[in-house]
Image (tube, rainbow, N blue to C red):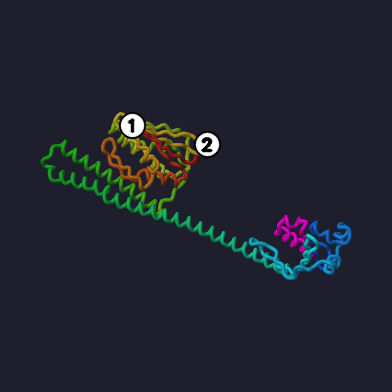
Amino acid sequence: MQNNKIKEIILNWSDELNTSLLNSDSFCIALFNIEGTLLFANKAISAFLTEEPNASLINPSFNKLLACENSEPLIFSGFLTLGDYNSINVCIEANIYRKNDQILILGGANTTQLFEQNERMHHLNREVSNLQRKLIKEKNLLEITLKQLEEVNSKLHELNVTKDKFFSIIAHDLKSPFNSILGFSKLLADGAPYYSTDKTQKLAHSIHDSSKNTFELLENLLEWTRLQRGKIIPNFTKINVNETSLDVQLLCEPIALSKDINLEFELDSTFYVRADNQMLKTVLRNLISNALKFTYPNGNVKVIAKNLENDILFIISDTGIGIESKYLNNLFSIDCNLSNKGTADEKGTGLGLILCKEFIENQNGKIWVESEIGKGSEFKFTLPKY
């Protein structure tokens, strides 16, 4: 075992030495263990052997080489350092002899020190490896922490935008319809004795419309607030798509009739989804109301459902004004600034589509929109089959 370890060290040495030096005819290199067994030798050593090279190299002895001291001049006696700038140097005690144009170097090294040095190198390598593993682990932890911080920062930004949107709605969208109600009701109160029936009815309708818009806004605002606070949890049940859509149809038909818009529903009575019934109604009501709002009189709004492999696909299409492509990617985002008025000057709450997205995603579905200016829009969403 010890001889094998010595050979391993010698081979490592030989890798460090210049190959041309080992194969040179001018330099004799041989290494032995303490028993006199040859461990390494180059071809040039044979010139100093008294027997045939093959026989000598099988079992050489120190005496055969040391005999050179009696006949060959000693030109150096001291310590030689083997190695280069890129490796660890090894120092050995050696004598150098010269015979004609050849040189013989006889040297020895303390194998105990070599073993100790080798062991120290192994220990150092282990320490370096452990340190590398520790650094990699810390780097990974830092990357995870950085990612978490980025997520928190993104959440904070979203919450800040949400807060700004909330106050904007309160300050403007909620204030405006109340001003209308107060103004119309004051006109009605002050001038009722003097107004004609038609004038009174017109003011009453205006108050009703403003009240309805205000109620819709408050309803969406409350739903959205509860959703943000995590107070709304889906109540998943088996829902018949056709039955639920009929309830929404009854609510939306008066709006369609008032704008002379053709509202069609094509839903298979055999389609069932796993969803929250109230959430599904809210989504359908908001999307259909939007379609009616942005469609001109004599236009069409259509609601259909398609059977997919694992989901039911809902499509609410209209022949309305369409949406610019630059708004499509963040149309369902809280920071979207799209606030066009409807074809009859209807005002939006700014929350309907945001509610739709969050309600659909809370029910394990997806929602998206396809639209083209002047041709209309198609709002699509999926819900899992029951």
Q: Is residue 231 above or below residue 367?
A: below
Residue at the limit of the structure toward the left, as seen here: 194
Q: Tell me which label, 1 or 2, sits earlier in the chain.
A: 2
Residue type at mark 2 is: Glu
Q: Which residue is mark 1?
A: 374
Along the line of sight, the residue nearer the viewer: 9 or 160: 9
> Can I make out residue 161 in this image?
yes
Q: Is residue 176 above or below residue 66?
A: above
Residue type at mark 1 is: Gly
Along the line of sight, the residue nearer the viewer: 37 or 67: 67
Q: Is residue 12 magenta?
A: yes
The disc placed on residue 309 is: 2
Please state, as top left, top right, bottom left or bottom right, where the N terminus lies in the image. bottom right
Q: State yes or no: discs 1 and 2 in contact (Cβ < 8 Å).
A: no
Q: Position of residue 71 (x, y in %)?
A: 84, 67
Q: Is residue 18 magenta?
A: yes
> Can I make out residue 35 in this image?
no
Q: Please give the range of residues in magenta.
A: 1-28
**Residue 346 sits in which quadrant?**
top left
Along the line of sight, the residue nearer the viewer: 272 or 295: 295
Q: Residues within 10 Å of mark 2 (few under 14, many from 20)?
A: few
Q: In front: mark 1 or mark 2? A: 1
Helix, strand or loop for disc 2: loop
**Residue 257 sits in which quadrant?**
top left
